[in-house]
Each structure stands twice: as structure tokens, then as C-alpha cells.
Amino acid sequence: MGLITWSDDNTYQIHYAGETIVLLPKEYALFQFLYTWKNRSFSRSDLLDRVWPLEEPTDRTVDDHIYRLRKKLQKWSHLLTIDTVRGVGYRLTLKEQQSPSPTILNSNFSETINKMLSTYHGMGMGAALQTLYTHQKVLGIQMDPFYATFLRFVVGDFNWFVEDKATPISDKLFYMFHLYHMTELDSQKTLEILQWALKNAKSMPENYQDELQITAISVYAQAKEWERAKKQLIPAREVVDRVNSPGFRLFFQAEEALLYLLMGESDEAEKVIQRSEEILQELPMQRELGSFTIARGLCLYHRQEITKARRLVDEGLEVVRNTKFVPHLIYGVQMILLFLKNFGYDAEWERKYQKMWAELSEEYKFDYLQKKIRAIIPSTI
């Protein structure tokens, strides 16, 4: 479909091909939800829960808003429709758009697009990645297969990884590990999944095997297996030196900082964070900037500077949220919760993040994902 963009200044505007439609706040929220979950049907009750969670409207409220949305979106009817699904509710349906034949576009164009994808990926520009992925047909491009899978992970289309039957399991094992790791607060259960992933690592692409070596640090740390985590720093550092990528180095240092934070060694954590911030001054990768801002805030908790800690943790999480990388947002909330649970510095803020975790769990169906992944494990060992 065409390039619909959204206002980010509370004006409730949506834009397409130079045209702007102004919506009311709830119309905007309803359209954004339906657009996010396009081609899926929702009952009136579902929509009331998602768009009016703290209010007590009636089914008629949904019908009235759908009616007004349809009128306002009429001039884009060639792009989408909001359909009534008999016996269910409503569905936003996208229409297929004609796009240039890939043979018309030369190889230089495709190469440029793939370079853009790589840059957006490295800089943590999730919204840009999502835009290119969503509109590749319209733009007449075909993404590298890596991004076809990776973008599903970035945007939070997690069910695909456990429900899709066409893609080989080996192409999804790495993502299944991360789906379990980031949705589970029981560190011992995550440790079991890590062992499963390591046993199956040889069936994964080499870069995923490398990432597992680094991610293992935080899994061991969260399970309070300190010696094992510190020992894992050695092979992980070897991977970083071999790959020689700023992104991999920051990834490793984020895991290292988390290890020291959970061990209560804030001085060591701050040294790692300082080295990372020096890299980020030269290469401002937003995901990583958000993660290390959170880590800096957690260090302040260790120093009992609660007010400053709260501000930095919230600031860092907001940076991560704005990158539109859903997994990084979930990991960020998880890291905060595990830290506050372990040290008990701030019961009020812990409750705040528990609520946020519950909302993420409901939206992305954490329990369902874990159950499906557990069912898949025996067939891959």
C-alpha cells in the first residue's frame, strides 16, 4: 500500500501522497490499532479493550467511530477499507497496489536499497525499516531474505515464528530463543532454553552463533551464575574482536554492563558504560543509546540516587520505544524489572514497570509464545 505516515506531535494527523487527514484522538487511536493489525478481524469487545481500556463505553461507541473513520478515509478507498465482518466485528483491509516490475529497476537501485536497510538496522531506525518492508511491493523492491524474517521480529509479529509452517525451523531457532529469553522472568527457565539453543547452534547462520555467545552472558548473569557468566566473557570478547563491528562491541558491552549491575559492582558497570558512550558519540545508534541510558540509571540506583535514577531509566526506555524495535523495548522493561526485583531499591517504580510488563505480555501473548516454543523444542534436540 502507499506510504501512510503518522504525526508525532499530538495533532492526530495521518498523511499519504501529500494529502492529510485530521482525526479526533480516539479515531486516531482506533485507526492506528486497526492499521497495525491490518487484515485481522476484531470484535467490538476487543476494540473497546484496546482503544478505550480505562473507560466504560458501549458497542455503539465503536460503531460510531468506525462510521466517522470510513467517511474521513473515503478518499483513500483505493488503498484500504474498514470492513464489517458478519458475526465478528471489523477488519481493516489493505488493497494490493500495482508496483514497478523488478526488471525495470536496475541492480544499482536494489543495491542502494539494501545499503539503506543495513544503515537503518545499524542505527536502530526501526520505523524506517518498517516503512521499507511494508511498502516493498509499491516501491518495486525485493528485500534480502534475512530482512524478510528480521523485520517480522522487529515489528512484533512474533506469532509468525511459532505458527508459520513453510519456513524451515533452522531459520527461526535463533529468534525462538530470543522470544523465550525476552518474555520470561524466570531465569532458570531461560537457562534451559539457552542450553537448547546452544545444542542447535550449528544449524544457525554463523552470525547468529556469534550472537548466542554474547547473549549467554546475560542469561547466566540473570540466573546468578556469576562465575559462568564471567567465564563466558572470554569467548564473547573473541567474537567481538574477530567481527570487528561497533554494533557487536556495543552489544557485548551492554551484556557486560548488565552482568556487573546484577552483581552489584556499579563501579565496573560504569567503566563499561563510559567506554560505550565514547563509541556512541561517534556512532549515535539509538537503540544502544537508550539501553546504556537505562544502565546508567540503574547504576544511580546502586548509589541510592533514586530521583536521578528514575529519570534516566525512564528517559532511556523512551529512547528505545521511539526506535520502534519492539524486542528492544521488551528487553528494556525486563532488564529494569529484574534489577529492581533483585535489589528492591524502588517498590513504587517496580510496580510501574510490572504494569508495563503485563501490558506487553497481553499485547504480544508471552504465555502463548512460551508454550508454543516449549512444544517445538523436543523436535529440534
Image (spheres, helix red, strand yellow):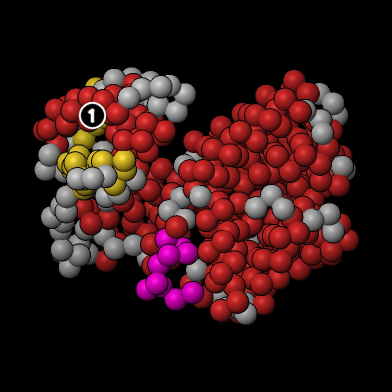
Q: Residues within 10 Å of mark 1 (few under 14, many from 20)?
A: some
Image coordinates of residue 103 in percent, x first then y, are 17, 68
Mark 1 highlights which residue?
Answer: 63
Magenta highlight on residue 377: no
Q: Nearer the viewer, residue 65 or 128?
A: 65
Magenta highlight on residue 168: yes
Q: Is residue 341 left or right of residue 209?
A: right
Q: Is residue 160 above or below residue 51?
A: below
Residue found 71% across the figure and 60% down from its top: 189
Report whether residue 316 is seen. Answer: no
Image coordinates of residue 193 in percent, x first then y, are 67, 66
Residue found 64% across the figure and 57% down from its top: 181
Q: How many marks?
A: 1
Q: Nearer the viewer, residue 142 or 360?
A: 360
Image coordinates of residue 171 in percent, x first then y, are 48, 72
Q: Quadrant of the C terminus?
A: bottom right
Q: Is residue 223 left or right of residue 27?
A: right
Report whether residue 43 is seen. Answer: yes
Q: Nearer the viewer, residue 66 or 229?
A: 66
Q: Farthest front residue?
A: 87
Q: Which residues are magenta?
A: 160-169
Q: Is residue 219 above or below residue 84?
A: below
Residue found 85% across the figure and 26% down from its top: 304
Three-letter amino acid code at disc 1?
A: Asp
Q: Secondary structure at mark 1?
A: helix
Image coordinates of residue 269 in percent, x first then y, are 81, 43
Quadrant of the rendered structure where residue 300 is?
Answer: top right
Residue found 45% across the figure and 28% down from its top: 53
